[in-house]
Image (cartoon, rainbow, N blue to C red):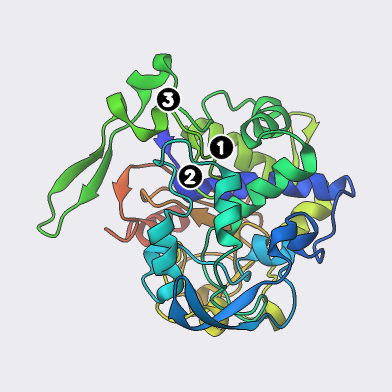
């Protein structure tokens, strides 16, 4: 019953939350994001320069909600360290949950003033897009993100230990988070007693949740069961199928579409991306054990999950070791899991 920082394993949960609103007819996937965030109407693409003096060009087309869910939006993360755009993200503390009083609305306002890395739909780049998805949930539903997730996903699925903050009575079960040093030693990165997860004003749809293995198993079981668990249906079967198919242009994989050298929680070759999940296209090209059609993601503290509908298999791995590239846990876990199948 240990509680873990699941970081980017928050993204699939929040993506499901938005797609529940899609099923209600509240938006279409090709709706421009500026329909719900008017300040994003005239977005620009970075060419050169630095904040506040940018050289930009207009986007080829407006960013859509599908772009946010599939990470083809043109947004980025501050830790990418690729360009002056992500340098501006670092300068302004974009999506930094440790900033006192910082909110989703603050992030949206700042992003409106910054250029995109590329025109939406032309490349793939891991980014704060799912934080924007969380904001869209608030705008469309009229509820705060934490309240919406609790009412529509966490309580119906029976996930009592999944939330944006740790309560006093959960502290004893909250795992410590460690960072691997260059010499291989572990350094305590986040002490449960005074963790940033004790309180929070920035509800990060991209990485803000804590959870347990059992709670996350409830969520992944719902996805494996095509949107239903224990008689409670969250999503329609066809919506789950839509979310877990490759949405990259022309059926490409990440090798073809991703910005070169950028961080991701998955292999590039043989892997596409759906609406909130990576999607296995070819285990041979990915050079890992797996099945075409499985979908997955992971978190910054080396947590990981994948769902293999063909094998009727769910694998969830929880630990607290940063960064997720510290040790090839996921590749080794895949080899172990699939070698055990008869």
- In the figure, residue 335 lies in which quadrant? bottom left
* Gap between marks 3 and 2 measured at Cα: 14 Å
Q: Is residue 300 left or right of residue 119?
A: left
- In the figure, residue 80 lies in which quadrant? bottom left
Kindly identify the residue that appears in the image at 74 percent across and 78 percent down. Answer: 61
Residue tagged by mark 2? Answer: 316
Residue 171, disc: none
Residue tagged by mark 3? Answer: 1
Q: Residue 229: where, in percent of width, then height? A: 72, 34
Q: Residue furthest front?
A: 53
Q: Secondary structure at mark 1?
A: helix
Looking at the image, tell me whether mark 1 or mark 2 is earlier in sequence order. Answer: 1
Q: Residue furthest left?
A: 183
Kindly identify the residue that appears in the image at 51 percent across and 65 percent down. Answer: 126
Asked if one can make out residue 47 in the rendered structure from this viewpoint, the answer is yes
Q: Secondary structure at mark 3?
A: loop
- Crowding at dot 1, Cα within 10 Å, few <14 / some 14-19 / many 20+, comes out as some
Q: Is residue 318 left or right of residue 322?
A: right
Task: Answer above or below: position of 167 versus 110.
Answer: above
Q: Secondary structure at mark 2?
A: strand
Asked if one can make out residue 307 in the rendered structure from this viewpoint, the answer is no
In this orientation, which residue lies closer to the viewer: 236 or 43?
A: 43
Q: Residue 88: where, in percent of width, then height? A: 43, 66
In this orientation, which residue lies closer to the viewer: 57 or 331?
A: 57
Q: Residue 218: where, in percent of width, then height? A: 61, 34
Task: Answer above or below: position of 283 versus 237.
Answer: below
Kindly identify the residue that appears in the image at 45 percent across and 66 percent down. Answer: 264
- In the figure, residue 271 lies in which quadrant? bottom right
Q: Residue 275: where, in percent of width, then height? A: 68, 60
Q: Are marks 1 and 2 in contact (CB under 8 Å)?
A: yes
Residue tagged by mark 1? Answer: 217
Kindly identify the residue that appears in the image at 52 percent across and 72 percent down. Answer: 283
């Amino acid at each position: 019953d240990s509680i873990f920082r699941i970081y980017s394993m928050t993204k699939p949960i929040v993506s499901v939350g938005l797609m529940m609103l899609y099923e209600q007819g509240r938006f279409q996937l090709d709706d421009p994001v500026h329909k719900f965030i008017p300040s994003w109407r005239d977005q620009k693409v970075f060419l050169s320069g630095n904040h506040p003096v940018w050289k930009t060009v207009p986007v080829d087309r407006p960013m859509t909600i599908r772009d946010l869910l599939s990470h083809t939006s043109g947004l980025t993360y501050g830790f990418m360290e690729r360009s002056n755009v992500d340098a501006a993200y670092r300068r302004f503390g974009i999506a930094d949950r440790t900033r006192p009083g910082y909110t989703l609305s603050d992030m949206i306002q700042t992003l409106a003033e910054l250029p995109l890395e590329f025109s939406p739909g032309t490349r793939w780049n891991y980014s704060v897009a799912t934080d924007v998805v969380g904001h869209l949930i608030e705008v469309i539903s009229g509820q705060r993100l934490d309240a919406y997730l609790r009412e529509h996903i966490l309580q119906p699925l029976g996930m009592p230990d999944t939330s944006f903050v740790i309560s006093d009575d959960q502290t004893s079960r909250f795992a410590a988070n460690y960072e691997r040093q260059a010499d291989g030693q572990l350094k305590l990165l986040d002490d449960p007693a005074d963790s940033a997860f004790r309180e929070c004003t920035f509800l990060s749809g991209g990485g803000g949740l804590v959870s347990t293995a059992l709670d996350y198993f409830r969520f992944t079981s719902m996805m494996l069961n095509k949107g239903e668990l224990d008689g409670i249906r969250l999503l329609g079967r066809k919506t789950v199928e839509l979310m877990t198919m490759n949405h990259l242009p022309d059926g490409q994989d990440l090798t073809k579409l991703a910005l070169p050298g950028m961080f991701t929680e998955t292999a590039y070759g043989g892997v596409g991306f759906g609406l909130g999940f990576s999607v296995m296209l070819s285990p041979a090209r990915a050079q890992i054990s797996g099945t075409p059609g499985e979908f997955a993601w992971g978190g910054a503290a080396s947590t990981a999950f994948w769902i293999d509908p063909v094998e009727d298999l769910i694998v969830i791995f929880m630990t607290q070791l940063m960064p997720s590239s510290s040790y090839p846990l996921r590749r080794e876990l895949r080899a172990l899991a699939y070698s055990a199948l008869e």
